Image: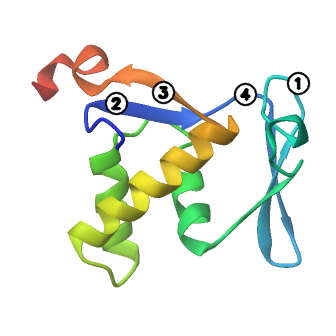
Amino acid sequence: MISPDARFERAPGVVARKVAGELVLVPVLPDVRTEAAGHPGIFVLNETAESLWEELARPRSPAELARHLTKHFDVSEERARQDVDHVLRDMQGRGVVRSTGSASATHPEAE
Protein backbone atom coordinates (compact mmCIF):
# COMPACT_ATOMS: atom_id res chain seq x y z
CA MET A 1 0.00 0.00 0.00
CA ILE A 2 1.19 3.51 -0.80
CA SER A 3 2.08 5.65 2.22
CA PRO A 4 -0.55 8.36 2.78
CA ASP A 5 2.26 10.80 3.67
CA ALA A 6 4.12 10.31 0.37
CA ARG A 7 3.99 12.80 -2.46
CA PHE A 8 4.31 11.82 -6.10
CA GLU A 9 5.08 13.53 -9.39
CA ARG A 10 5.81 12.59 -12.98
CA ALA A 11 9.25 11.11 -13.51
CA PRO A 12 11.59 12.87 -15.93
CA GLY A 13 12.19 11.05 -19.17
CA VAL A 14 8.57 10.28 -19.99
CA VAL A 15 6.74 11.95 -22.87
CA ALA A 16 2.93 11.96 -22.96
CA ARG A 17 1.04 12.23 -26.24
CA LYS A 18 -2.58 11.86 -27.31
CA VAL A 19 -2.92 9.15 -29.94
CA ALA A 20 -6.35 8.29 -31.32
CA GLY A 21 -7.99 9.88 -28.30
CA GLU A 22 -5.89 8.02 -25.70
CA LEU A 23 -2.99 9.30 -23.64
CA VAL A 24 0.16 7.31 -24.33
CA LEU A 25 3.30 7.55 -22.18
CA VAL A 26 6.57 6.96 -24.00
CA PRO A 27 9.81 6.57 -22.02
CA VAL A 28 12.70 8.51 -23.55
CA LEU A 29 15.37 7.94 -20.88
CA PRO A 30 16.98 4.57 -20.19
CA ASP A 31 16.13 4.58 -16.47
CA VAL A 32 12.40 4.25 -17.21
CA ARG A 33 11.51 0.56 -17.06
CA THR A 34 10.57 -0.96 -20.41
CA GLU A 35 10.70 -4.38 -22.07
CA ALA A 36 13.75 -5.45 -20.06
CA ALA A 37 11.61 -5.32 -16.91
CA GLY A 38 8.73 -7.16 -18.58
CA HIS A 39 6.77 -4.01 -19.42
CA PRO A 40 5.92 -2.77 -22.89
CA GLY A 41 7.86 0.23 -24.18
CA ILE A 42 4.75 2.42 -24.16
CA PHE A 43 1.92 2.79 -21.66
CA VAL A 44 -1.67 3.58 -22.64
CA LEU A 45 -3.65 5.19 -19.83
CA ASN A 46 -7.33 4.69 -19.11
CA GLU A 47 -9.49 7.69 -18.22
CA THR A 48 -8.79 7.47 -14.49
CA ALA A 49 -5.02 7.08 -14.91
CA GLU A 50 -4.98 9.93 -17.45
CA SER A 51 -6.74 12.22 -15.00
CA LEU A 52 -4.22 11.32 -12.28
CA TRP A 53 -1.31 11.82 -14.71
CA GLU A 54 -2.52 15.36 -15.40
CA GLU A 55 -2.66 16.05 -11.64
CA LEU A 56 0.89 14.71 -11.20
CA ALA A 57 2.33 17.67 -13.14
CA ARG A 58 3.21 18.86 -9.62
CA PRO A 59 3.74 16.83 -6.43
CA ARG A 60 0.52 15.40 -5.01
CA SER A 61 -0.33 13.20 -2.05
CA PRO A 62 -2.56 10.13 -2.43
CA ALA A 63 -5.29 11.98 -0.49
CA GLU A 64 -5.15 14.93 -2.90
CA LEU A 65 -5.37 12.57 -5.87
CA ALA A 66 -8.31 10.68 -4.32
CA ARG A 67 -10.17 13.97 -3.70
CA HIS A 68 -9.57 14.86 -7.35
CA LEU A 69 -11.16 11.59 -8.45
CA THR A 70 -14.23 12.07 -6.24
CA LYS A 71 -14.74 15.54 -7.72
CA HIS A 72 -14.41 14.44 -11.35
CA PHE A 73 -15.80 10.90 -11.35
CA ASP A 74 -18.81 9.28 -9.74
CA VAL A 75 -16.82 7.27 -7.16
CA SER A 76 -16.83 6.95 -3.40
CA GLU A 77 -13.88 8.12 -1.32
CA GLU A 78 -12.94 4.50 -0.56
CA ARG A 79 -13.00 3.52 -4.26
CA ALA A 80 -10.99 6.63 -5.16
CA ARG A 81 -8.34 5.74 -2.54
CA GLN A 82 -8.14 2.19 -3.92
CA ASP A 83 -7.83 3.44 -7.50
CA VAL A 84 -5.12 5.93 -6.53
CA ASP A 85 -3.18 3.25 -4.67
CA HIS A 86 -3.40 0.87 -7.64
CA VAL A 87 -2.45 3.47 -10.26
CA LEU A 88 0.43 4.92 -8.23
CA ARG A 89 1.89 1.47 -7.49
CA ASP A 90 1.65 0.53 -11.17
CA MET A 91 3.12 3.81 -12.43
CA GLN A 92 5.87 3.78 -9.81
CA GLY A 93 6.72 0.18 -10.68
CA ARG A 94 7.05 1.17 -14.32
CA GLY A 95 9.18 4.18 -13.42
CA VAL A 96 6.88 6.83 -14.86
CA VAL A 97 6.14 8.50 -11.49
CA ARG A 98 8.42 9.03 -8.53
CA SER A 99 8.06 9.78 -4.86
CA THR A 100 9.18 13.26 -3.85
CA GLY A 101 9.14 12.60 -0.10
CA SER A 102 6.43 13.12 2.48
CA ALA A 103 3.81 15.84 2.65
CA SER A 104 5.00 16.87 6.11
CA ALA A 105 8.62 17.19 4.91
CA THR A 106 7.68 19.50 2.04
CA HIS A 107 4.75 21.22 3.76
CA PRO A 108 5.37 21.50 7.53
CA GLU A 109 1.94 23.02 8.07
CA ALA A 110 0.39 19.68 6.99
CA GLU A 111 1.27 18.17 10.38
Compute the Cα span from label 4 to label 3.
Answer: 12 Å
Q: How is the image coloured?
A: rainbow
Cα distance in 3D space between marks 3 and 1: 18 Å
Residue highlighted by disc 2: 6
Closest to the observer, 55 or 61: 61
In the displayed structure, does residue 93 sit left or right of residue 18? Answer: left
Identify the residue under disc 3.
Answer: 99
Residue identified by numbered label 1: 30
Q: Amino acid at mark 3?
A: Ser
On screen, residue 93 versus residue 66, left or right, reads right
The secondary element bearing badge 2 is classed as strand
Taking the spot 81% from the left edge, 45% from the top edge, the residue there is 38
Q: Position of residue 45 (x, y in %)?
A: 69, 65
Q: In which quadrant of the rendered image does the C terminus lie? A: top left
Give the amino acid at mark 4: Pro
- Which residue in the structure is indicated by mark 4? 12
Which secondary structure lies at badge 3? strand
Q: Are marks 3 and 2 in contact (CB under 8 Å)?
A: yes
Q: Earlier in the sequence, mark 1 or mark 2?
A: 2
Q: Could you tell me which quadrant the N terminus lies in? A: top left
Mark 4 vs mark 1: give the one in front. Answer: 1
